Amino acid sequence: MASNPVPDIPLNDGTTIPQLGFGVFQIKPRDTTQAVRTALEVGYRHIDTAEMYGNEAEVGQAVRTSGLTRDEVFVTSKLTNAAHRPDDARKAFEATLDALGFDYLDLFLIHWPLPTRYDGDFVSTWQVLEEFSRDGRARSIGVSNFQVPHLERLTAETEIVPSVNQIEVHPYFGNEEVRAYGRAHGILTQAWSPIAQGLVLDDPTIVDVAEQLGRTPAQVVLRWHLQRGDIVFPKSNTPARIEENFRLFDFELDEATMERISSLDRGEAGRQGEHPDTFDYLPS
């Protein structure tokens, strides 16, 4: 196994999380075990999956057969949109643990707030995650795709502050209002779609910086995320790309370069994914 230069950063519940992870969104189940095994061999120690990705079992298999102990690998999963009712959420969490073959998760998230579903009640769903936190089966709990009003409601009506909020963030969409709320309330930001599904990699500013530093555009963008303090988890099936995305800790972007990249923000026009206020997908 390769050495691991990834910093562990503190969460608001007293635990820590590796700042760089490996994501398995849209990786087919048949390819997931090998991709995760490769990532672990490269040095990743944080794997991000979800019930709706359909590859939890393969993630678990890769971790269990990696030669690493369970406590050496930080694993995140997320609640399916189809199971927000409290009893359904409890069953879904049990199914996640069974699929992974684990007796606990390092981090479990509500995948989407779904404010137009379930009578707009994501609070009772969060209270079930609080149960998992208290009984130790989820070392940390958090949310994904929550907007500021959603977070404010949790603050007002529940007891545990989310440890993270996993949201769309990339140079074309800084999502700064949500990030700022997180900073003010001790909620770390995890950035999904960190390279905007590849769109930013051809941006002239990114290409110019990459050429100046002798790095790839993807490395430049991922380094920008890390220096902003966000948690990031790029994905790939390609071993060379998996390794490339890990080589982020032997260079830095200066302040002027960070500002150049941040200035690419297009606000709401830069959003590539669904808007959390209206997204209402329920898997069959």
Image (spheres, grey):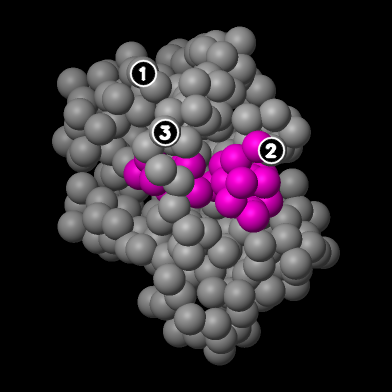
Magenta part mainly helix, strand or loop? Answer: helix
Q: Which mark is residue 177?
A: 1
Residue hosting label 3:
256
Callout 1 crowding tier (Cα within 10 Å): few <14, some 14–19, many ≥20: few
Question: Measured along the vertical axis of the image, is residue 101 above or below residue 271?
Answer: below
Residue corresponding to mark 2: 207
On the image, which quarter does residue 80 sit in? top right
What amino acid does circle 1 point to? Glu
Q: Is 216 located above or below residue 269 in the figure?
A: below
Q: CA distance from mark 1 to mark 3?
A: 22 Å
Q: Position of residue 103 (x, y in %)?
A: 43, 70
Q: Is residue 156 left or right of residue 53?
A: left
Q: Circle 2 — which element?
A: helix
Taking the spot 48% from the left edge, 42% from the top edge, the residue there is: 224
Residue 284 location (% of width, % of height): 73, 33
> Relative to the observer, which residue lies in front, 149 or 83?
149
Q: Is residue 87 magenta?
A: no
Would you identify the image quadrant in which residue 274 lies? Answer: top right
